[in-house]
Amino acid sequence: MEKSGQLWGGRFTSGPHEIFAEFNDSFRFDQRLFAADVRSSVAHANGLADAGVISREECDAIIGGLSQMIVDSENQANYFESNAEDVHSFIEGRLIDIIGDAGRKLHTGRSRNDQVATAFRLWLRGEIDDIDSLIRELQAAILDSANGYSDAVIPGYTHLQRAQPVLFAHWCLAYFEMFKRDRERLADCRKRLNIMPLGSGALAGTGYPIDRSAVAAELGFEGITANSLDGVSDRDFAVEFASVCSLLMVHLSRLAEDLIIYCSQEFGFITLSDSVSSGSSLMPQKKNPDALELLRGKAGRVIGHNVGLLTMIKGLPLAYNKDMQEDKEAVFDCVDTVSISLKAAAIVIENLVVNEDVSNDAATHGYLNATELADYLVKKGVPFRTAHETVGKAVLFAIDENKELNELSLDELRQFSDQIDDDVFDALSLEATLASKSAVGGTSPKRVAESLENARNYPTAA
């Protein structure tokens, strides 16, 4: 194990207690920022050279050493075996080992406070882009399923009671819209994250004439922080990211809950693939929707990280405080949990089977066309509230007769309103019920086909 020096030992006459060192050190998890920190360090070295703080030869040596570290990290299995305090001291220690005293000049004009904030933003920016791609893949799976079962109908529910029939594709598109908003929120979060704090120093700024805007441009940031105190202490981007992830996981959880219900024997609308299900250690007949249940459960994990981050920063005085070290593990786990959840959800959707006979049959039972009968009467000149009451009485009668509304005879229907004629049965058919919902955003086959086309043409970038 390599012994890496601390970056702050000069003022101290003894080393830290071993328990405090374990409590304080973050290298075991923040080494994930290695590549981002190296990239930031290259840009900082260029900024120092451009400002005349270090020579171009020293800058080239620093960049060469940093580049060598990237190569070594990719080719040496035990490269990160170290007792370094954090990834930043690890990089500096390794750089000095490679190029000597020139490596000691890299930290000129910066603090770990603005260094870590910059590396964290760089790393998270890339992860946001990856998560956006995973959401797009899930959306593609949803659209493929909608297209594959374009004629399937399921009951729509309110209060988990059968309400009105909807196309299965319409149900799919509801989740497409949720995930579209998630992508838009991610893109919006990325804009605020993509501001560079490097050059804020520990809290008061840097005393060297470094062109912060040039460094930001090299790193792909859209701007620089306007206040050094805020630059090193801001973790809004971490909280905002966790918040976006929380809502994304809520949408995945709702999707999972719907499918858990739909695949139950009581519903039987869908069948899950064996590849995302498990069995019982005791009951041989069981096929459990474990992937979906994990999606539902992991939502609470991410929501917890969001609450934890908010609680961590709520009482911090300006500027940097060690409490902020707690931001990394929360955000790292949000990234990991959201990423695997999106992949799992896509696999579920890609492999599910809609049992159209079962779902279509369910959509024609339970008086789901009652609203159509009320609308039919309204079109005959009956006030809606009167029509609503009339149809309610007709439903009670149909329940007593153990019939659906469209199974009642014309005479039976006419006892509730003399406005009812032979054309009522066309109005109460499943096809007419669906087709009547023709306003934009409705479940009519025409509108759903338009929505599917619009979804397929939705930009690949949010």
Image (tube, rainbow, N blue to C red):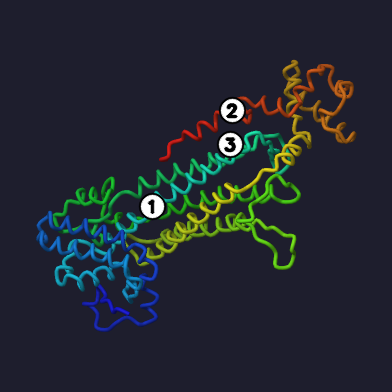
Badge 3 crowding class, 10 Å Cα cut-off, few under 14, some 14 to 19, many 20 or more, is some
- The disc label shown at residue 341, or none: none
Percent coordinates x, y for residue 440 in the rendering: 57, 27
Percent coordinates x, y for residue 346 in the rendering: 54, 49
Which badge, 1 or 3, comes first in the chain's sequence? 3
> Circle 2 sits in a helix, a strand or a loop, which is it?
helix
Please state which of the two labelled residues, at mark 2 or mark 3, is closer to the viewer. 3
- The disc label shown at residue 147, or none: 3
Is residue 43 shown left or right of residue 138? left
Of residue 245 and residue 173, the one placed in the foreground of this image is 173
Q: What residue type is labelled 1?
A: Phe
For image coordinates 65% across by 45% down, the residue present is: 353
In the depicted structure, whether residue 1 falls above or below residue 225: below
* C-alpha distance separating marks 1 and 3: 37 Å
Residue 319 visible to the viewer? no
> Circle 3 sits in a helix, a strand or a loop, which is it?
helix
For image coordinates 49% across by 35% down, the residue present is: 456
Which badge, 2 or 1, comes first in the chain's sequence? 1
Percent coordinates x, y for residue 233 in the rendering: 33, 58
Residue under label 1 = 237
Residue under label 2 = 447
> Circle 1 sits in a helix, a strand or a loop, which is it?
helix
| Image quadrant occupied by the C terminus | top left
Of residue 278 and residue 135, the one placed in the foreground of this image is 278
Residue 315 visible to the viewer? yes
Percent coordinates x, y for residue 293 in the rendering: 62, 57
Q: Which amino acid does label 2 sit on?
A: Arg
